[in-house]
Amino acid sequence: MAVNKEYNAEQIQVLEGLEAVRKRPGMYIGSTGTKGLHHLVWEVVDNSIDEFLAGYGDKIEVSIEQGDIVTVRDYGRGIPVDIHPKKGLPAAQLVLTTLHAGGKFDGGGYKVSGGLHGVGISVVNALSEWLELEIHRGGYIYRQSYKQGIPVSKFKKGERTKETGTQIRFKADKEIFDKIDYKFDTLSTRLQESAFLNKNLKLVLTDNREDKQNEVEYCYSGGLEAFVKHLNESQTSLVDDIVYIEEEVDDTYVEVAFQYNKSYNESIYTFANNINTHDGGYHLTGFKAAITKAFNNYAKDNNLLKKKDPSLTGRDLREGLTAVVSVKLTEPQFEGQTKTKLGNSEIRSIVEKVVYDFLGYYLDTNPKLAKAVVEKALEAVRARKASKKARELARRKGILNNNSLPGKLSDCSSRKPEECELYLVEGDSAGGSAKQGRNREFQAILPLKGKIMNVERARLNKILKNTEIASVVTALGAGIGEEFDIEKLRYHKIVIMTDADVDGAHICTLILTLFYRYMPQLIEEGHVYIAQPPLYKVKYGKKEKYLYSDVQLKEHLKGKDRSRVTIQRYKGLGEMNPEQLWDTTMDPKNRKLQKIEVEDEIMADDIFNRLMGSKARLRREFIMKNANLADNIDI
């Protein structure tokens, strides 16, 4: 990308003030939960990455201090410090206190940028209990402090320095966020992702919190090739080749990498100006069209398709595909404030032409890859036809019929989906207690016998033959796979209720894999929960108390005469009578439910691949790495 040398106060364009941010934070960062909290860090880091893209500074340091204080330091040019010609204030102060104030609107300060186009850093400032700004520029250090977005000190010129860059140090406001606790793995995964997307940019993450000391450093010269290799680590590759495409068309930079594996899943990740466009957009459409056209043309030109074979569909050709599509453009148009979909229509033809032209040559010179992909796609065609027959059979049996219900389901009396809850319960014993203890008005119970099939290693035609999965699909009433229709969902709250042991955790993971792979909208739209039954019932004298963790038990026993304490450890839900199960786990007034959300789709996909895929080595590594986080394991 071209380097922009000019960056001063005149290039800071001011559009509006900061008033609404603290009143409606969700509009700017998505939520006030964990996702929104981490979004603050992304906004500051994205600004630093914009400096790297402009040609300045190849290192960004992120640290978490005690008290969940975050510092982000880059070595770019530093935010301009001169007085803005129209506003009469230091440019840096305008950037920190005014929405839509930044160097990204007229193309002068930045040719390519991510973040929220000047919204980001001011929103971070507004939603922080306090923020400290430090700028190294022009041979001096400049500082200013803020509280809840308001300056509490003057913008001051300090001591001399030979360095350049910007440092932002902030503490998220507890008045805004539900809980302030940064997750090292979440930050690490995102920073690694940014390193993959920006060749030769070094990103360092340090955690200095008590008992959480950790440090990682990421820098990749291979770019998206290294990214795809990392994504496919948990898979068995179809062919070792990673296809890499890089080209600049006018002011648009296109970078693509992909590799095929032997799984049945399609994993395509798209980015625009380093922003993860979760909902795709025209760059995704162009890539898919190029893949479909290029492989079909190769198959026809090389007589790989028989007369009876139809043209291969895009879905068939993308089975087992892992790809990353990254575009950088000067005027990106995103749908929605959180930028999940790229709306520049012209990008479709650019990406399609770049990828198709490259593949036209590449496939002719790499016939091993081309033939392997076409052969796998033909297998997918046969499997698709088998799945169609399986769906038709399942429909005749009532599995996919919205009007039928599985025999072992104890339904609720309400017919309003928004009021109804479905409990997926491990075992007939716990199912019996749940049926007796529930509120029949809005709570339905579906007991599951044993462990359902691991859908990560099977196609849909095999999955539909599994009795327990068929019961779940029938009960939900919304179908499965490409026929899934969220509008037909019978229950808007689906609660997985399993024992608090290893088998219970495995069953829960199998159910989540089913939802994630074949009914992802259930998770995306917030319908899936995990019940949190108590681990202990503690009786002290005549008083009884339910406790949900070893930490709670330890705290509860402090100062008590142990000879008067009776502790009951629940090994399974079946040990509770109906009244206890209702009081502790099913009563909306008392129960604890854990909502299932996807914080990072790449990390989530990787975890499912590692835990549920065919490589035992990766599961073992995952267990060893996270063993210290496990508790409540029966030995």
Image: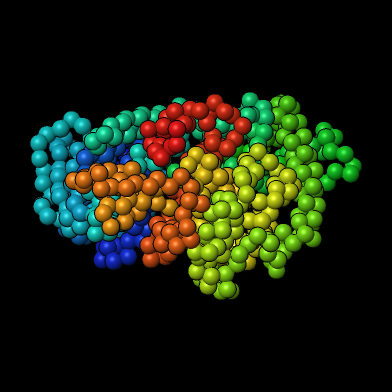
Q: Is residue 475 left or right of residue 66?
A: right
- Nearer the observer, 276 or 512: 512
Figure check: 587 above or below 79: below
For the point 34% across and 57% down, the residue is 32
**Residue 223 at what x, y percent from top left?**
48, 31
Residue 594 visible within the image = yes
The quadrant holding residue 160 is: top left
Q: Residue at x 10, y 52 (%)?
A: 154
- Across and down, in percent, residue 465 comes to 73, 48
Drawn side of residue 114 relative to residue 96, left or right: right
Question: x and y percent of residue 626 in the render?
Answer: 42, 33
Count of picture labels: 0
Q: Is residue 335 left or right of residue 24?
A: right
Quadrant in which the C terminus is drawn = top left
**Does the image show residue 509?**
no
Q: Tell me, what colour scheme is on the image?
A: rainbow
Across and down, in percent, residue 109 comes to: 33, 47
Residue under the image location 10 percent in, 46 percent down = 156
> Which of these two is toward me, 251 or 119?
119
Q: The N terminus appears in which quarter of the rendering?
A: top left
Question: What residue do we see at 49% from left, 64% from top?
Answer: 437
Q: Nearer the viewer, residue 585 or 616?
A: 585
Nearer to us in this view, 172 or 491:
491
